[in-house]
Image (cartoon, coloured by chain):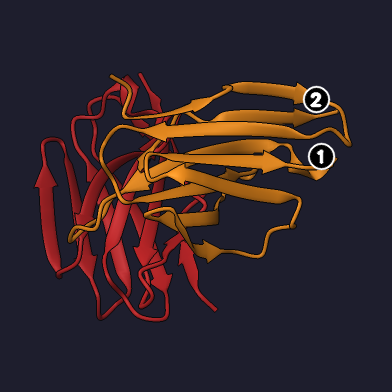
Chain colours: A red, B orange
């Protein structure tokens, strides 16, 4: 079967750095996505990785290792508004998105 | 301008009733989706339409029927509502690009009593 694993919940301090991991086992791979979802709101796109390596967008970076079936989302200089769920999703060989359950990130002052 | 809009945002109804949720996107995307997000926060694909044609129909009860009058609209009709249908339903759209990221509507929270 296809599976995406990510921690259920993480806590970090304002101003710090946090890394949210995602491991996947899918039938084929056509890219990995990270989405942010604030409570009661819609998911919004953060990043897309299809090749190995690091993609950086402002305070957020996403890393991919296809051989290890592994990605992480790195958030720097954490702000209170970063408190949200972070969803990892992988496009399989049929270009269907397989979603993780999300990691709830709690930021403390 | 809202890119993907869905109505209503909240729906409270009794078991056995029929309800509809409407979705419209003004992004010019070719593909639209309906997702269900339950209390455990898993996003589950229900339907996907590409240029008004159904391309994914995951195993959902046939009480759920999508309708796409044109490629900018994808509505969801639910017959004989059950308690287990309570969830947030998200409409989304995407374009055929390298990444093809999804753009989501604000969600419609359905509560069945």
Cβ atoms at labels 1 and 2 below 8 Å apart:
yes
Foreground: A104 or B80? Answer: B80
Foreground: B84 or B28? Answer: B28
Residue found at x 54% / y 32%? B22
Question: Label 1, on which residue?
Answer: B81
Q: Is residue A25 visible?
A: yes
Residue found at x 69% / y 30%? B110
Relative image position of residue B80 (x, y in whole percent): 84, 42
Quarter of the figure with the N terminus of chain A: bottom right
What element does badge 1 sit on?
loop
Residue found at x 60% / y 32%? B21
Quarter of the figure with the C terminus of chain A: top left
Marked residue nearer the N-terminal end (1 or 2): 2
For disc 1, the chain is B
Relative image position of residue B95 (x, y in whole percent): 26, 51
Question: Label 2, on which residue?
Answer: B13
Bin the neighbour count of mark 2 within 10 Å (Cα to Cα): few under 14, some 14-19, many 20 and up.
some
Report whether B54 appears left or right of B29.
right
């Amino acid at each position: 079967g296809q599976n995406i694993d990510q921690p259920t919940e993480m806590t970090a301090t304002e101003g710090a750095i946090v890394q949210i991991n995602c491991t996947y086992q899918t039938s084929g791979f056509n890219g990995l996505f990270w989405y942010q979802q604030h409570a009661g709101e819609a998911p919004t796109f953060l990043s897309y990785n299809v090749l190995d390596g690091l993609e950086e967008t402002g305070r957020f970076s996403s890393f991919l290792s296809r051989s290890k079936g592994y990605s992480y989302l790195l958030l720097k200089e954490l702000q209170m508004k970063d408190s949200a769920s972070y969803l990892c999703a992988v496009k399989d060989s049929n270009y269907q998105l397989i979603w993780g359950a999300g990691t709830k990130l709690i930021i403390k002052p | 301008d809202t890119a993907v809009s869905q109505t209503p945002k909240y729906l409270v109804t009794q078991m056995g009733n029929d309800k509809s949720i409407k979705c419209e996107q003004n992004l010019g995307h070719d593909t639209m989706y309906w997702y269900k997000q339950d209390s455990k926060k898993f996003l589950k694909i229900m339907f996907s339409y590409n240029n008004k044609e159904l391309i994914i129909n995951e195993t959902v009860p046939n009480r759920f029927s999508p309708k796409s009058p044109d490629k900018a609209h994808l509505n969801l009709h639910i017959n004989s509502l059950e308690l287990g249908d309570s969830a947030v339903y998200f409409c989304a759209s995407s374009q055929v690009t390298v990444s093809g990221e999804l753009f989501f509507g604000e969600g419609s929270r359905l509560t069945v009593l």
